[in-house]
Amino acid sequence: MKSKKVFAIGALALALLLGACSSSSDTASENATTEETAFPTEDLTLNISWWGEQEAPGAQKWLEESIALYTKEHPNVTIKHVLQTTDGLIPSFEAAAAAQSGPDIQYFWGGIYSQQPGWDGHIAPISDYLSEEELSHYINAKVESGFQGKVWTAPWYVNPSFPLLVRKDILADNGLSVPTNWDELMKVCDVLSAKKITTIAGGVKDGWFGGWIYSILGGQSVQSQADVINAVVGTTKFTDPEHATWWTKLEESRDRKCWNDDINSLELYQAQQKFVDGKAAMTITAGPDAPNFVKKAGGDEKVTIMAMPAWSDGPLAGKMGTTSQTLGITKWSKYPQVAADFIKFTHSTERLNAWYAATGSMPADDRFDISQVESASTKALFESALNGAPYLENFIPAQLDADAVFKNVQLVLKGTVTAADAAADMQAVMERLRTSDRKLVDNFTAWAK
Amino acid sequence: MKLTRGKSEAVGVVSRQRPARSSREALIWIAPAAFVILFIFGYSVITVLIQSFRYDGDWVGFENFSIVITDPIFLTALKHNGLLLLAVPVLITLAFIIAIALFETRRGMRFYRSAVFLPYVLPIPVVAVVFGQIYQLHGALNLFLKSIGLDFLAKDWLGDPAIALGTMSSVIIWKEVGFGVILMLAHIISLPNETYEAARIDGAGFWRTHFSITRPAILNTIVFYGVIEAITMVSWVFNYVYVMSNGLGGPGNATMVSELYIYRSAFQNKAPELAAAAAVFLFIATLVLMIAFFRIQRRSIAGTFNK
C-alpha cells in the first residue's frame, strides 16, 4: 500500500515535470499540391508565426498592410499573425510541429534553420507551390533553402550578415581613421582602450552575437560553405587551421581590449545601444537594421558600414556575408496554395518597394530596384549583400552553434578558456552530435550534393 | 504533549465510529477528479516513458539513456542541481532565524511579515529580469558597492562562469525564503505559551529557548519545507535559469540545470527522445527525494507522538 502511494505521488510528480516534453513523432502527411490548384472559394483563415520586427523595425506595419491589401483582393481569406520573440521563435514552432497544428506560414532564418524543418517533415517545399521562374528571383533561395532540387522556404528579406558599423566621428576625434584590415583594427583598439573608449560594442549573454562573430571571423579562412559542411560530417575537423584560427583572432581582440568590458553581462541589443549613444566607436548589427542604426547615430556623415576587416587572404575575407530570412509553409496547413499565393503577393513590385519604405532594408528579390535607395551607405550595403559570401552560421547544426559557438565565445571573451580549448570543445561537441543526432550526417551530406 | 495525544485519540474515536461508509463516500467524491488527474498526467507519463525508448518511431532500447548519461552537458546540469541543493540548508536556517525574529517582534509584525513574503508571490520571470539588470557588471549592485568603497567586491555576477551559479542561487534564496518564514512562523505562533513561560521560569535564555523548544516543536514544518525546497532545486528552477541566462544556461554551461537541458533538447535541439530520457532521470531523482520526505515525515511524526 505504501509503495503504491509513493508510486502514485511519484507518477504525478513526473507528469508535472515532464508533461511539456511529450511530442508526437508522427510524420506529416504528404499534401503537396501544385500552383495550378484552384483558389479556394470558402471562408478560410491563415495563421502566420513570424519574427523580424526586432531586426527590421517597420516589418509589422508592412505585414499588416500586406494582409489588408491581400484580404481585400480575396475577401474569403482571413490572415492572422503572431510576432514571436527571438528566444521563442524556434521553441514555439517545435511545439506546433510536435502537435502537428499551428501556423500555416512560419518564419525561418536561412540555411540550416530552414533546412532542418524540411528534413524533419514539418514544412512542404515552397517549390511545390511557386514556379521555378518566380523562385529564381528570390535572393539566396537555392544556396540556403535548396535541397536536392527542391526549395524549402521563400526568402522574404535579405540580411547582410553582419556589417560592422563604424563611427567616423569618434575615430576622427581620437586621431584615427577607418581600419581597412585586421592589424589596423587592433591598433584602433589599442588607442581607444587606452582612452577608456569601447572600440566595438557587443553583448553575448543571449548567445546570438557569438554566432555572428563566428561567421564574420571564421568565414575568412574557409574557401566556401562546403568546407564547413565537411567538418560537420567529419571529413575534416573543427580543430583544423581553416576552422580554428578564428578563435585566436577572437582571443587577440579580447587581449587588445576591443570589446566593452561588460560584454558577458549584456544582451546583444542592450550592447548595441552603446554605439547609438556614442559610447562605442563600432558595433555589429543585423543588416536589415543597419540603415536605422546609421540614422540614429547621425547618418552617413558620421557612420560608415563595412565588412569586418580581413585578417586572412581567403576568398571570403573582407566580404559581407549574405543570408535571407524566409517564410515556409507548414505540412499541416490546409491551404498551402493560398499561403504560397500570399507569399508571392508580398513579392509584387509594389510590396517590395513598400517593404523598403517601411523598414529601410532590402527585400529578398532581385526585381527590387536598388536605384531608389538614396543613402550611399545603404546602397553599398545592399550591393555587397547581392554579391556576398555565404553566411557560415547557417551551414552548421543549430545545436553546434548553441552548445559550442555561443558557449565558447562567451568563455573566450571572459578569458576562461583559450582559443585552442574552444576549438577542441567545438570538435568534441560536433563528434557527440554525430552520435546523438543519428540522421545528421546523412542530411548534411545530402544537402551538400 | 498530552493535549496532542488527546486530540489524536479523539480523532481515532470519531474515525472508529464512522468506518467504512466514510471511506467509500470519500472515494466516490474524489473519483471524478482523481480520474481526470490520472488520465491527463498518466497519459503524459506513459508518453514520455515510451518516447525515451524510441527514436524516429523505432524501438532503440536504452540508446537514448546512454546518449544522455554520457553527455557532458547533462552531467554538468545534474552537478549544478546537486550544488543548488546546498542552498537548502541556507534557506532553512535563514527562514528559521527570520521567523523567530518576526515572532519576537512586538511592533510592526504584520508589515515585516508581508515584506518577507512579498518576494515569494512575485512572478519568477519578473524577479529574474530585475535581478538580471541588478547583477550586470555596471548594474545597480556593483554601483552601490563602488559607492561605499567596496570596489573589490564588484563582480561580473552573471557573466563570470565561476560565480554565475552562486549568483543565481542567491536570487532563488531571496525568493523562496519567504515561504519558509510564513510556514515556520504560523507553526511557532500556534505553539502553547505555557511551554515558553516554563522555559523562562527555568532560566532558559533567548537562544536556548528557541534552539531547544521552538526548533524541535516545529521540526515537521522544517522537514516539510526542506524537502519542498530540495525538490525545487532539483526540478523547479527552470524559470530562474531560463530568464537570467536567456535560455542558454550560460556563461558557458555555468548555470545549466537538468530542466533546461530537457527543454533545450525537446524544443531547441529537436531531440524529444533525448529530452524524454533525461526527464526519466530527473523523475527518478525527484522520486528519491519524495520517498525520503515521506520516510522522514513518518519518522518525525512517530517521534513527536512517542514524546
Image (spheres, coloured by chain):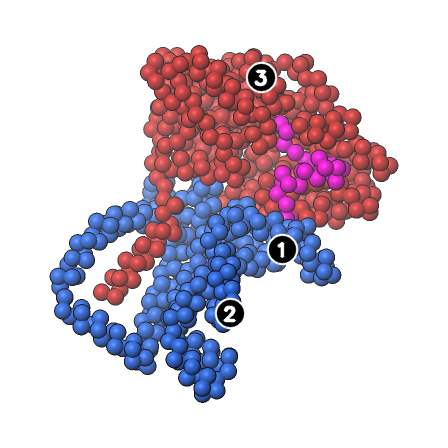
Chain colours: A red, B blue
The residue that mark 3 highlights is A354
Q: Nearer the viewer, mark 2 or mark 1?
A: 2
**Of the pair B89 and B290, the residue shown nearer to us:** B89
- What is the chain identity of the residue bearing mark 1? B
Q: Which of the marked residues, 2 or 1, is nearer the chain's N terminus?
A: 2
Q: Which residues are magenta?
A: A264-289
Count residues near mark 3 (Cα–Cα under 10 Å), then give few for <14, some for 14-19, many for 20+.
some
**Of the pair B184 and B64, the residue shown nearer to us:** B184
Q: Tell me residue A340's x, y (percent).
A: 44, 19
Q: Magenta span has A287?
A: yes
For the point 82% across and 47% down, the residue is A194
For the point 58% across and 32% down, the residue is A54
Tell me how far mark 1 sits from mark 3, CA to CA: 45 Å
For the point 71% across and 45% down, the residue is A260
Query: In the shown orientation, is residue A43 left or right of residue A70?
Result: left
Q: Nearer the viewer, mark 2 or mark 3?
A: 2
